[in-house]
Amino acid sequence: MSLNFSFRQIRLLLPMSMASSKGCACGTQCKSKDDEVDGETLKTLEAQYDALMKSNSKSLLRKYLTRRTFDKLKTKKTGSGSTLLDCIKSGLENHDSGVGVYAPDAEAYTVFGDLFDKIICHYHGFDRTQRHPNQDWGNIGCIGDLDPEMKYVASTRVRCGRSLAGYPFNPLLTEQQYLEMEKKCSTVLKSLPGEFQGEYYPLDGMTKDIQQQLIDDHFLFKEGDRFLQSANACRFWPKGRGIFHNADKTFLVWVNEEDHLRIISMQPGGNLGEVYTRFVNGVCEIGRKITFARSEKFGYLTFCPTNLGTAIRASVHIQLPKLASNKDELEKVAAQYSLQVRGTRGEHTEAEEGLYDISNKRRLGLTEFEAIKEMHDGIKALIDKEEKL
Ligand code: ADP
Ligand code: DAR
């Protein structure tokens, strides 16, 4: 059995006299002030920060964690006890991260705001004086089919992340909390009416064959993401994790992967209007029974800052043989429409047989409808360009 404890858990398990020791070499249990970060954590931060700054990492962590910001934040803690190390451990251990940070709890976005705000501004174009707009699903009926002749789009998916109010994020969750959240969420999901009716399948006890088939069919999250593992997001795995889906697998919910919930609507073809309608109705049904964590400034709160705000990623699996003959060119054109290009199996994967996952990049500082419209207009533009080549 592997022991799964984050730095904070170990501190919490120690008797108070030791937990608050300064880690004095002399072995006496010097009592340190509660708001001081323990010596072991500081030592790890200093060593790994130096290594990151000497590397050729292109992560936003390396770009924005200047020495001055590092020195200012390294001794800070949130009320739940999370430290700068809890926030940046993934980026310290994976220099090939694109971003490199996660929030161990909601308060980290404020306590470590000197770092998070710069990364959020870079990723979303959202500066620290802004406030995320109120939720607005928009005029759903005006969103149609991206590819009515079914020439390019294999399938369409809209997902959002949601966090349960009152719970921290992965690095601070206890095994008990994972199980408690799974129980709460699965009970609500199994009570969904109409087209959302379905079954919850815990990962704990799921056969490897069924799990792999769900992953291969793009319904279930992959396992072993090293970025999440480094962020202490996979402790007690697979306990408290699972997937809910309706009979047609057009409405699915992931429980306790990267976020507490990932709510997904998807179907073959390019009918974004149908996918979005189902998505909105499903999110609202769940939101009637579960209180989501939301802040004035950042909208819906998520583990990763790239998912804040609407937390929506609307994507197509699409083949654009001419445009994609040069991937760099495809990414350049996509970026003009604030679109992000992923591989066939999602993030950190490559395209298979020219099938790309293309989605909106921005999720924060715009409404739900604007995020969907940005993806809609971008995909339409890419198809238009493909037609003209
Ligand atoms: P997320 O969408 O939650 O950010 P990933 O990028 O890892 O996470 O994608 C998760 C899964 O969803 C992957 O298997 C990916 O292939 C699948 N997926 C994403 N977009 C689509 C789509 N439009 N059609 C079918 N599967 C999709
Ligand atoms: N792999 C991490 C996270 C990037 C955003 N994707 C998320 N949150 N799934 C990185 O820093 O590259």
Image (cartoon, grey):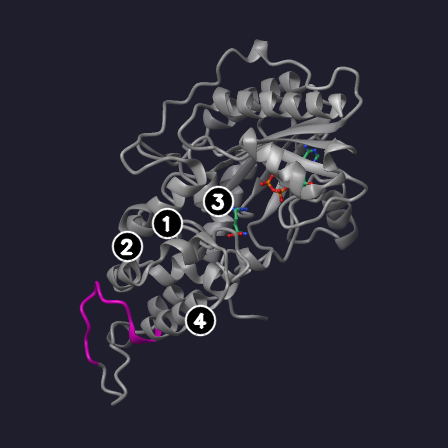
The alpha-carbon separation of the residues under discs 2 and 1 comes to 8 Å
C-beta proximity under 8 Å, tags 3 and 2: no
**Camera-nearest label, 3 or 2:** 2
Tag 2 or tag 4, which sits nearer the N-term?
Answer: 4
Residue on which the image places disc 4: 51
Q: Earlier in the sequence, mark 1 or mark 3?
A: 1
* Mark 3 residue crowding within 10 angstroms, few (<14) / some (14–19) / many (20+): some
Q: Position of residue 382 (x, y in %)?
A: 67, 26
Q: Earlier in the sequence, mark 4 or mark 3?
A: 4
Q: Which residue is mark 1?
A: 105
Q: Main secondary structure of the magenta part?
A: loop
Nearer the viewer's eye, disc 4 or disc 2? 4
Quadrant for the C terminus in the image: top right
* 326 sits left or right of 42 in the view: right
In the rendered image, the vertical position of residue 257 relative to residue 129, given as above or below:
below
Query: Left or right of 47: which side holds 31?
Result: left
Disc 4 from disc 3: Cα separation: 37 Å
Residue assigned mark 2: 78
Quadrant containing the N terminus is bottom right
Give the residues drawn in magenta, as a range.
30-40
Q: Say few, some or many: other residues with alpha carbon within 10 Å of mark 4 (under 14 / 14 to 19 / 20 or more).
A: some
Residue plotted at (73% across, 31% down): 318
Identified at 51% across, 50% down, the residue is 179
In reply to whether residue 222 is colored magenta, the answer given is: no
Judging by the rendered image, the residue that carries numbered circle 3 is 181
Marks 4, 3: nearer the viewer? 4
At a point 47% along the width and 59% down the height, the residue shown is 91
The mark found on residue 290 in the picture is none
Q: Secondary structure at mark 1?
A: loop
* Residue type (three-letter) at the residue carrying disc 4: Ala
Dividing the picture into quadrants, the one containing residue 89 is: bottom left
